[in-house]
Image (spheres, helix red, strand yellow):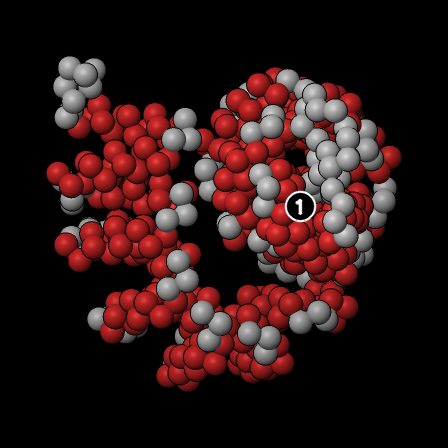
Amino acid sequence: ALEIAPNHLDGRELRVWTYRRELRFAEAAAELRSLLRRHPNRGRWVRNLFEVLLIEQQYDEAAESVGSFLERVRPAGGALHDFRLNLLQALQAAKRFDQQIATVQTWLAADETNRELRGWLVAALLAAHDDTAAQRVARQWYQADPADAPTAKVYREVLVETGRFAAAEQLVLEALENDPGNAGLQLALIGVLGKAGQSDAALELVESLSPGAAQPVAWLAAQLDLYQAAKRYDEAAGLAARMLQDDALLRGVGTWGETYLRERLTGVWIAALLSGGRYDEAQVKLTRWIEQAASPDDKFGYLRLLAGVYQERGQAAEALESLELAYSLDPTEAGINNDLGYTLAEKGERLDEAERMVRKAVAREPMNAAYLDSLGWVLYRRGRFEEAKTWLLKAARTPEMREDPVIYDHLGDACWRVGAADEAAAYWKKAVELAEARRQEREDASDRRVAESAAAKGEATESGRSPQVAPVVGEKREEGQGRPAADRE
């Protein structure tokens, strides 16, 4: 169609969509730049280019694109809010914190009492690690109107975020003196104590206040979170089970809320059983739930949880079977495409199919770091090391993966394969540091394996030996091509 009418705008926009689905983000960006040169004020195209540039991690251009658009156009209603958020997101990703702060201050000067803009300013200051300034502005707003609950909440959250737990606790206690029966303030106090590591005191408060509470779900959810934070897994599992069996409690949150709450409680219950080493019980319960599932959606969720149990137990064949069954129930869902594709790559089986699955997941959620890592790892296992490194670097640079040791272990292997030995050593060292830090919080077999594997590869490199990096499928296992990297959590 575009050969017939090369400048047909709808056709060109559809081509952008196609490029994105095929993960050809650079070509999508080029097409959008060309379109915007002709029509620079098309908000839909500006946002589309912003999204693509974020995926490509070209944060400076993303900020400039949205910023210049806002200088030319003042979008109506919610669009202004969304474009402003886009600009701040790009500036923060580019680490242009001073400009991010100055931008919010400019907006706030024209609308001084706007609570949302105040929240954005505090968030920008915290992102810039200027804790003193964040505390100062939040305190000034609070002192100007101490009776305003949202303003007090912002100040309290800043105090907690900056580690001033005693001051945050005192702030809530002072508010409770004026309104001792306020459930929101009581829950806030419990939250502050939990953040401060005072789980026992927080639990004691929950247990003393929750009986007869008007919103029992909120209290029980707070109690559940505290049990998990305190590593009291048996009690967490028991509470989640009792909540799941309380039909009146579940019905009280409405149809949509009940579905969400059941899913969350089921996940918490199984996670608590696994954390407590109760694998047999988790497996038996999930198997029974799968047999009794009332809907395909329920069965789908239980099968994915069961696959996780099998993976924890090292039963790879059973885990793969559960994932295959879940995939058969919903083959378009991004998460199952990622999980099954990654599992096949780890086993070195059906790699064409694995790559298609993971690409489908990335096309659905191109900013999902776990999916980016999976794509990089599938490509690595296929021997396409340069491509693998590109995608693994994208994953490592996303905020949620910066603390995940597995991605750095994968990235180290990819760098070694392309001859970047110094980079590989640095990434393996990072993997060890992150894995050991997580093990300080909770003992985990996956973190232990990553730490041991990455440390061994780093030591081999330092001593002039070839490290045992993960093998390519079909490759002869020789020195430098040895054991696979550890499984991800």
Q: Quadrant of residue 12?
A: top left
Q: Is residue 172 above or below residue 424?
A: below
The front one of 44 and 190 is 44
The quadrant of the image that shows the C terminus is: top right
Name the spot of residue 485 as percent of width and height, x first. 72, 39
Residue that appears at 35% across and 40% down:
52
* Residue 125 as seen in the image, left or right of residue 249: left
Number of numbered callouts drawn: 1
Label 1 element class: helix
x, y percent for residue 245: 73, 40
Report whether residue 13 is seen. yes
Q: Is residue 248 visible?
A: no
Q: Residue at x 22, y 71 (%)?
A: 110
Residue drawn where x is 78% and y is 23% of the image = 317
**Which residue is at a point 72% across and 71% down the rendered structure image?**
198
Q: Amino acid at mark 1?
A: Asp
Residue 475 at x, y = what percent? 70, 24
The residue labelled by disc 1 is 409
**Whole-percent x and y of residue 209?**
69, 66
Q: Is residue 434 left or right of residue 314?
A: left
Vertical position of residue 264 compared to residue 374: above or below: below
